[in-house]
Amino acid sequence: MARASSGTAEPELRGPVAIVRETARSSGRVAPFLFFLGILAANLWPFAAGVALFDGVASAIFRRTHPDAASSSLLGYRLARLRQALLLVCTGYVLLLVCSVLVGIGVSPAILAVLWIVPTVAAFYPLVWIVGMRVWRPGSVLVCLLLSLFIPCAVPLVMFELLKQLRRALDNERFSVGWLRAVPRPTGS
């Protein structure tokens, strides 16, 4: 397979014996790649669990700061929930930078904080997808996600732009926006 794809030699694939022989020759080249993919998948599963943990903590914070949201069907509360989660991700990024500097200068207990903050940072990507699909066109969301994967300084720019768009959407829904709270404006204002 490898020789055929590179064009160096054409494999002989006539009959089951020849197919097995050619597959055995190429498996030595494919096995390290598959091993690498397996290691990568084994190391990334905690991020998925961490994002679920972040969502649970963010939900608990939202329920505490917005007790009226459970009995309301206002779109503004859903937007407020997304905005609050993005704000928590922003603070997670700032804390990650601070803890990274502390670890770099030799303050070893900061590594425990980094382990706790990593799920917050990993939650950025699903949040960009969810919020972006609500306030941007789908193509813009994909571009922002790709940029933030390869250009580290794009992450805060994307977050701040999404926060600005969410604030505008909350204003359109007639919500007053504070730091971690957004509440409906009285009907007379």
Image: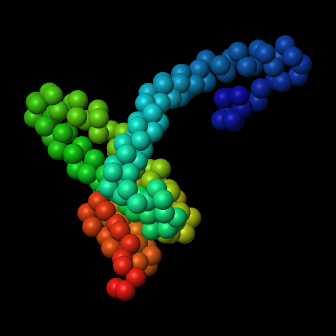
Quadrant of image for the N terminus: top right
Q: In this rendering, is residue 162 above or below 2?
A: below
The image position of residue 94, as x and y in percent, is 22, 50
Whether residue 87 is visible: yes
Quadrant of image for the C terminus: bottom left
Q: Nearer the viewer, residue 55 or 91?
A: 55
Q: Nearer the viewer, residue 123 or 23?
A: 123
Q: In this rendering, is residue 165 above or below 25?
A: below
Residue at figure coordinates x 37%, y 86% from the top left? 188
Left or right of residue 52: residue 28: right
Q: Nearer the viewer, residue 38 or 70?
A: 70
The image position of residue 161, as x and y in percent, is 36, 67
Q: Nearer the viewer, residue 45 or 130?
A: 130
The image position of residue 101, as x and y in percent, is 15, 40
Q: In this rendering, is residue 119 above or below 170?
A: above
The color scheme shown is: rainbow
Q: Quadrant of residue 154?
A: bottom left
Residue at figure coordinates x 83%, y 17% from the top left? 18
Whether residue 78 is visible: no
Residue at figure coordinates x 57%, y 25% from the top left? 34
Left or right of residue 4: residue 178: left
Query: In the image as oriented, which residue stretches furthest toward the bottom?
Result: 188
Left or right of residue 130: residue 123: left
Residue at figure coordinates x 18%, y 39% from the top left? 99
